[in-house]
Image: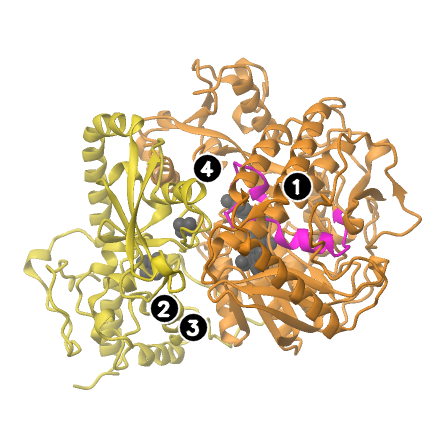
Amino acid sequence: MYEHDVIVVGAGGAGLRAAIAAHEAGADVAMVTKLHPVRSHTGAAEGGINAALREGDDWELHAYDTMKGSDYLGDAPAIETLAKDAPEDTITLEHWGMPFSREDDGTVSQRPFGGLSFPRTTYAGAETGHHLLHVLYEQVVKRGIQVYDEWFVMNLAVSDEPDPNDRTCHGVVAYDVQSGKIDGFKARNGVIIATGGPGQAFDHTTNAVSCTGDGQAIAYRAGVPLEDMEFVQFHPTTLPSTGVLISEGVRGEGGILYNEKGERFMFEHGYANNDGELASRDVVSRAELTEVNEGRGVEDEYVHLDMRHLGAERILDRLENILHLAEDFEGVDGLVEPMPVKPGQHYEMGGIETDENGKTCIDGLYAAGECACVSVHGANRLGGNALPELVVFGKRAGYHAAGKDLGEAEIETGYTSDVEEETDVDLPVTPGEAGLDPNPEAVATDGSGQALDAEDALERAVETERARTERLIEKDDGVKHADIRAKLQEAMTQNVNVFREEQGLKKALKAIRECRELYQDVYVQDPSRTFNTDLQMTYETRNLIDVAETITLGALVRNEFRGAHWRLENQERDDENWLKHTLISWNAGKPSIWYRPVILEGEDKTYEPKVRSY
Amino acid sequence: MSTQEQQPEPETEPETEPETQESPADPEMSGLASPQQRRLQRKAANLAERERQAAEDESNLEEDTVHLKVFRFDPEVEDKQEPRFDDFHVPFERGMTVLDALIYARDEYDSSLTFRHSCRQAICGSDAFFVNGSQHLGCKTQISELEQPVRVEPLPHQEVVKDLVVDMEHFYEQMHAVEPYMQQEDLPEGELEEMRQSRENREKIKMSTRCIWCAACMSSCNIAAGDNQYLGPAAINKAYRFAMDEREDEEIKEHRLRIIEQEHGVWRCQTQFSCTEVCPKDIPLTEHIQELKREAVKKNLKFW
Ligand SMILES: Cc1cc2nc3c(=O)[nH]c(=O)nc-3n(C[C@H](O)[C@H](O)[C@H](O)COP(=O)(O)OP(=O)(O)OC[C@H]3O[C@@H](n4cnc5c(N)ncnc54)[C@H](O)[C@@H]3O)c2cc1C
Ligand code: SF4
Ligand code: FES
């Protein structure tokens, strides 16, 4: 058993920043992460980090843009905190050595980005995330913060009160991938979940193989609601074979999208007669998919992004990294042929419900980064707004967990009896636990009412995971997790993509149910305790099932078109009924759906919903 | 300045004595382009060559399968304790990388096949393997460019944990040994004021900041293989990244130079260029090492 004041789960931008803050506040902090920190997916971010640094810009403009971009589903206290803290936290990165791109006078450069009223995206070449990740890791090394790397967190150790709001988190159970050892990590003050997004719920994504929504799933099963999960951002230009992102820059420079017949469909089929290829991400993604669905896709799968007409010189000058991406990952030479592209899952706006201090409704449990939903992005994230979220809310969660006073939060968390509940949704299958598991839930919390002390909670959680692992490895045959994952991903990509309709969403729920049932028979083929990635991925697949279900349930109940969420049955934003967050609680295996109003009242103004047009 | 560049030498035995002088200017090298340009030229040549072959190769591959020969070892599993190679035949698809092929083999044929990977886009640095005899990132290596069968082995000179997974601990220790963090304490006073850095200076350190800690360079280095304490190209490059950053004061730079000119530091390098050749991020490692040697000499840190 290991013991520290603060345990940070995950070592991407959010986790590293949280650990540094907790350390600064005097806590004994340790990080437990399934990947070595520098392998985290934050490294893939290219574009930049938004912060109001310059004259002519201020945090209020940043907040306004973010609220508008969120399609009025972000909470004002969260958005204003982001906009206010981002400048200082960005400059701190510079002081820690981040190699930002520079102006002639040596100050950091900023560039324009979609949806921003001021060029406030601070960047370091085309690899901002890589530098942010490495600079933060350097600070962790400098401070001598303990990192348990390649330790996979299987579960939380949470006490057992019937009402999740009364529960306390005492630590985590993790599996040392290299040795196979399963052990407990006791957290005297708090656990901060910073595990990133769940992109692997889809078979085509810009997210890493490690983005499996683990933190969301374990928090959810411990009783923390997941918020606004239906809001998934899809990026219109990703390479078909890997999902590698081709940045907006290509279209910005004049790149053209063609269908199989060589038609410039954005105009010729009237998807965006003014903006054409430069229309917003969701519009372009839907256009591409319509082309493919109507039989005009290349090889029935993708469309072409052509930049050849820009000429080799301009391409080499401005878009050289795109040439490398297309060549290395798709085997295509962008100078002599068009590049194949299709929409891919890119970012999960929803996540673990937290307040501005990163706190969840469970005492001692925090979340920050893409896995969390404090709600700054609402229904749609603006480019360049995720990285500041990592440092701003990572830092706050770290401070708060270490006991620093950040003031009372305005955002409320946790289910209370006065919230609005969803009562009349027609579900094709019962969601939640399949109920066939011979050895039921792994979480310490079954709501049975035995409040557990820290040691008991941890011991029980460790024992449950050891038994579960034993069972999975001992089992001689059954279903492979990879087959279940493939089925899940296919159902999600087919039915819960940029087009959502009631029938499709119901189909997805049925498929998810089938995955749950198949999972009762899952087994781990690899008998070894050494670096058993088969076991790890089997755990991850289970997490993906739970997270995918919340995405689909949210998408089914929200019958409106807001931000990234489009519904065939109601293609309009419906402020009268839907200025509210969707929350899903696990309820010991019987998910329930409820709502909480959006907070549009800011510090000294109220944000009035306007049409989101640019 | 790159006047002291050397051409990659033919395989030579590593010498145990550290180099005590700067490498002499090689007449054959004078007038040649920088390593960066050489790489671009090489890429262009490869591209032309590939185009010529592409038609036949790809049509061959298209109906064909990829033949992988993958190194297997597991200290715990009886029939894997003796290292062996397993053959996998994977259906080829356009754009398929070595990593894609491995994932297919694992998911379809053998779930116990073990390798690190995550981002699939050459940024996490997890999947450096020894492919057909040299270090490559699996995710960045197109199958269509390789001769079959494709032999995939773990990185040489590192202890194998299982299959393609090697122990990275030593590599991380060396990275940490160069105090890889900004040490400037004296910060601008103004609110929200950044340290200034010229564009030229940023450009100077740019390539060195791209390292993804994949350890391909370390694995390719003869010197590192012979001297376990040698800092290795990646760590020295990390030191370069800070030593050359004008945001740190001169004393800090001197402190950094002292670290890298220790017994197992820069003077061990024999400019064989193997690291530079394999670096998936095109970092001119050998050049950086040479430059640090010159800086150390300039600072009179080394008395011979
Ligand atoms: C291609 C791409 C480009 C992007 N570009 C931009 C951009 O330009 N600007 C911007 O603002 N945003 C951008 N984003 C979004 C942004 O990069 C991400 O949202 C953000 O980096 C997520 O950071 P994180 O710290 O929350 O998670 P991650 O960086 O994904 O880190 C998650 C960490 O959790 C650990 N972990 C996960 N599960 C477990 C477990 N079970 N046990 C232990 N550890 C675990 C992992 O090891 C990892 O260390 C981009 C995203 C992508 C994919
Ligand atoms: S210098 Fe290049 S080869 Fe070496 S670890 Fe860094 S990226 Fe890999
Ligand atoms: S999988 Fe990340 S570098 Fe290859």
Towards the viewer: B280 or A253: B280
- What amino acid is found at the position of numbered circle 3 in the picture? Glu
Asked whether the residues under marks 2 and 3 belong to the same chain, the reply is yes
Disc 1 chain ID? A
Task: Check disc 2 and report the residue beneath it.
Answer: B171
Disc 3 to disc 1: CB gap under 8 Å: no
Disc 4 is placed on an element classified as loop
- Whether residue A213 is in magenta: the answer is yes
User: CA separation, marks 4 and 3?
Assistant: 35 Å
* Rendering colour (chain A): orange
Q: Position of residue B132 (x, y in %)?
A: 23, 49
Q: Is residue A533 left or right of residue A552?
A: left
A324 to A452, vertically: above or below:
above
Give the spatial CA distance, label 4 vs label 1. Answer: 34 Å
- Label 3 near label 2: C-beta < 8 Å? no
Q: Which labelled disc corresponds to residue A246?
A: 4
Of all chains in the rendering, the one displayed in yellow is B
